[in-house]
Structure formats: structure tokens, C-alpha cells
Amino acid sequence: MQHYDYIFTGSGLSALMTVYEMLLSGNFDDKSILLLDENAKKVNDRTWCFWDEEDTPPKGHPSKRGESLEKIVSKKWNQAIFANEKFNRVLELAPYQYKKINGLDFYELVFKKISEHKNIHFLNQKVVDFTELGNHCIVKTEQESFTCNKIFNSIYNPNAVTAQTKFTLIHQHFIGWFIKSKEPVFTPDCATFMDFSVNQKGNTRFMYVLPTSTTEALLEYTLFSKNLLPKEEYEAEIQQYMKNLGITEYEIIEKEQGNIPMTCYPFWKHNTKNIINIGSAGGWTKASTGYTFKNAYKKSKVLVQFLEKNISTSLEKTDFRKFHRKDKFWFYDLLLLDILDSQNELGSKIFSSMFQSGNPAVIFKFLDEETSFIEDLQVIWRCPKMIFVKALFGRIRSLIAV
């Protein structure tokens, strides 16, 4: 069997982001790396958005590593709308901008970088099993098997979450249409971040709109809820929303759909000395919002720095069980998910209380997990207090029961 220093089982956002950081660091050029995925990453299968300071790469990118993701940002917005059935607020995002990256642009950027390094290989094969055996690991695909020193696994196992009841699982699920309309109804420099004016139907439901011109936009009907919907219901809601905007004729350019797990389940407890779970499989998704891009960027950087501490001596010294660390934001997310689990219809009320009069820059900084405790309070105190107090006592009772 062919042996590698590192094998990535799955090559989604977090895996490719980690490999990209490894390449930029320059400290892994003598390590053999294999990426395995049944998806060849040749199509534009998703869109990632994140807020960041104007004309900069995501915060924390070391300048010595040079290359920025800014060059593949396809659109930026300086304003964003937050709305519900009672109010509509245009948020001035400065010093932030809301930025969009197309999946295919990111794939092409990373694979071009990979092609410049002979020590990295990609195989379009489906992983069926992997395991740790002492100081090495075995990975099996449908075609062959490989051995390695370390595994980075991004294949999500839903059974780990659904088999327990201590930690809530909420899905962020959506269908999006990128359309071109006859009528010029969109404002190109203003995205719709969350529009809760749509019928909530006992859930947390909103429309998300990313305009690229006066006649072109991505419209996504999105829910934070336990259960998925029939495809027809998402699309009927998109059609109704377009009708309300005054759109009578349109062409669908592309479609996308997704289902992102939102949970505070401790995936890191499944890490072993030589196997680490990353991406959704490792709990890298921001649990309270479902945002993945910025979290994957930050955590991949920290992971590569963790690897670099021991790379000069021996791979055996790297113990993935020591990687994870819980913080205050994990607990904030835990309480919000507990609320959405028991009273899913409260999502609109909670997010509206934050955005109706709060400082957008502080809120986005809070959602990026970069605020001080004083700044945390500026956001938290705007939320319905009794709802969170009840969730806090409920969580305390569950801990005592254990």
C-alpha cells in the first residue's frame, strides 16, 4: 500500500482550506499529502459569504504567507437589509463589507496551488473506511487502500449527533435560485441579510438575497429548524417572494441547495492521537448561524500552526486530542440552539432584537467570535432576557441530572 504523511478523507471547504494554509506556510513541502473525494470539485456547487473589513483577507492571515483570498471575491456589499413583518432596516456595514466567493473559484484557486507541488496528490475516489492502528492509519476507498501517519477527516457522520439527546441539532437548510429578471428590482450594493417578513409557519424562516445587478440576484429561502421541507415548498416561497418584489418575468441561471448542521455537539471527543475531524465533521460550523467559510478559515489556520509546533521534530509528537478548546461563544451558541429546539418560532424575535437598533459592526464582530465581554453584553442585553434565562436554567438542570 502507498504510504503518505497526511491523508484528507474528503476535500470540502475545510480540507482544502487546511491544505491551502499548509502550502502557504512552506513548512510542509517535504511531507506527502493525499486528498480523497468522490466529488471532483469541477462545478460551482455552492456559494460562501462572510463579512470582513474592507479590502482585506479574513482577519489573522499572516502577511508573510502572502497570498490572499481577496482575489476570488466575486462581489462585495457595503450595506445589508435586515427585516421582519414590522420593520426594515438598512445596515451600514463599515468597517466591514459582506463578501461572496463562488465555490468553483475557490476550488480552482486551491487546485492550481496544489498542482505546483509534487508532494500533494488528489484522487477522485470515495472513502469507505478509515481506522487508526497504533502509530499509523489505514484509509480504504472503493478502489484501493492507503496508509498514513495522520488523517484529517471531513466526512460528516450524522449518527454521532442523532444518537444522543444532550446536544441539540438544528438544520440550516435552504434552496437558492440565481435569477435574471426582466424588471430592475434589486439594489446591487445592498444585500438582504435576513428578511423574516415571510410567513414563519412555526419555524425560523427567512429570505436571503444577494444582488449582483439591478436585474440579477441569488435568492435563498432558508430555515433554522429540525425538519427539512419538500423541494416544492422552498421553491414556491421563492416564487412568492419574487412576486412580492414585482418580478413577473425571470430566467433561472443556477440553483443551489444545502443542509448545514447547527449543533454544539463535542465532535472533538472523537479525535484520536492520529485522526482529527474537521469541517462539519469536527464542529467547525458556527453553531448559531450555520456560517462556515470564516470559521473554516480561522480554524484551518490554527490547526496548521498546531501542526507546525511539532513538525520540525516528529509527526508522532502531534496529538490531535490536544487540539480543541471550548470558549464563551460555544456556550452562547448552546443556549440559542436550546431555545430554537424547544421554541423554533422565536428565531425571528431573537435576531430582530439584535438588529433592530444594535450596532451592526459590533453584532458582526460578535458573530465572528472576536468581541470582548463588554461588547458581548452590548449584543446579549438586546435579546429577550427571560427566554435566555430559562434556557440557562434548563441547561444547568440537564448538567445536574448527568
Image: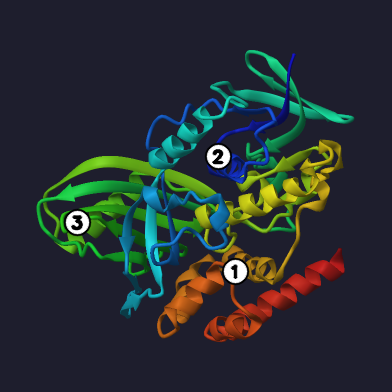
Give the Cα distance between marks 1 and 3. 32 Å
Residue type at mark 1: give it. Answer: Glu
Mark before the other along the chain sequence, 1 or 3: 3
User: Which mark is in front, 3 or 2?
Assistant: 2
Q: Residues within 10 Å of mark 3 (few under 14, many from 20)?
A: some
Q: Where is residue 171 shown, x and y percent of the image?
A: 54, 53
x and y, in percent, of residue 63 in the image? 54, 57
Residue ID for mark 1: 369
**Mark 2 packing: few (<14 Cα in 10 Å), some, or many (20+)?**
many
- Looking at the rendered structure, the secondary structure element under dot 1 is loop
Describe the element under mark 3 as helix, strand or loop: loop
Amino acid type indicated by mark 2:
Leu
Nearest to N terminus: mark 1 or mark 2: 2
Residue at the (47%, 63%) spot, across then down: 203
Mark linked to residue 28 = none
Q: Which residue is mark 3?
A: 213
Would you say residue 287 is visible in this rendering?
Answer: yes
Choose the circle earlier in sequence order: 3 or 2.
2
Position of 392 with respect to 188 (left or right) is right
Q: In the rendered view, tell whether residue 270 sits above or below residue 380.
A: above
- Quadrant hosting residue 166: bottom right
Q: Nearer the viewer, mark 1 or mark 2?
A: 2
Identify the image quadrant of the N terminus: top right
Residue type at tag 3: Ser
Per the model, the C-alpha gap separating discs 1 and 2 is: 23 Å
**Residue 221, image x, y percentages:** 36, 55
The residue identified by callout 2 is: 16
Question: In this view of the protein, which residue sits in the foreground, 13 or 95?
Answer: 95
Up/down of 101 relative to 358, above or below: above
Q: Are marks 3 and 2 in contact (CB under 8 Å)?
A: no
Q: Nearer the viewer, residue 202 or 356?
A: 356
Res. 170 visible in picture: no
